[in-house]
Amino acid sequence: MKKLVLSMFTSLDGYIEGPGGFLSPPWSAQVGEAWARQNLADAGHLLYGRVNFAFNKSFWTSPAAADHPETATMNGLPKTVISRTLAGDPGWNGSLASGDLRGVVSDLKRSVTGGNIYSFGGAGLARSLIAEDLVDEYILMLTPNLWGGGKRLFDSGLPAIALELLGARTLDVGSVILRYRRARASA
């Protein structure tokens, strides 16, 4: 059975979007390798919310993405879009899912072949996945920013979840990648 990996970047004060919206992390060749290419090397399927799917689709299918080493992988991976409002074919190698999030994720974990299932966010989907305790691994890039406001990944009202540290890596731009596994009791 495949794992669901939530992979997101967050400011030091816990925001995944700054006061004006999108949070862009400091970037370098090392970040591209350690973050983008490493995540995609393990991915066999991508899970998106509607807004983040539209944002990523518009970028990765544009001429601006042509020179990025991740473009072919991003465009080729199958995607599931969680949405209550979209209808029809979303394009970009995607399919729509709605209804019971736990059921959708469970079906994906059983049916995906190849790598694991990765969710790169949107805030709403990420919080829903955490609230339902569906995430098997968290990969967080902690950026050297204090935003002072915006949208948080971990907000009040989420369940207590025990995690085990799998690794930590400091990057040349001052960011740190933290990788955690959901600690589950043995049966």
Image (spheres, helix red, strand yellow):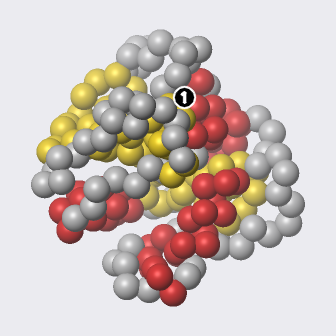
Q: Residue at x 34, y 53 (%)?
A: 25
Q: Amino acid at mark 1?
A: Ile
Q: Position of residue 131 (x, y in %)?
A: 59, 24
Q: Is residue 8 left or right of residue 167?
A: right
Disc 1 residue crowd, few under 14, some 14–19, many 20+, Cα 10 Å = some
Q: Is residue 128 left or right of residue 23?
A: right
Look at the picture and state if 35 lies above or below 160: below
Question: Where does label 1 land, which residue?
Answer: 130
Is any atom of residue 17 visible in this view? yes
Q: Residue at x 57, y 40 (%)?
A: 123
Q: Is residue 61 left or right of residue 27?
A: right
Number of labels in the image equals 1
Q: Position of residue 96 (x, y in %)?
A: 76, 57
Q: Between residues 37 and 68, which one lies in front from this camera angle?
A: 68
Q: Quadrant of the C terminus?
A: top left
Look at the picture and state if 20 lies above or below 74: above
Element carrying mark 1: helix
Is any atom of residue 119 visible in this view? no
Look at the picture and state if 70 lies above or below 37: below
Q: Position of residue 138 (x, y in %)?
A: 39, 37
Q: Residue at x 51, y 51 (%)?
A: 22
Look at the picture and state if 75 lies above or below 19: below
Residue 10: quarter of image? top left
Q: Position of residue 53 (x, y in %)?
A: 63, 59
Q: Residue at x 57, y 79 (%)?
A: 61
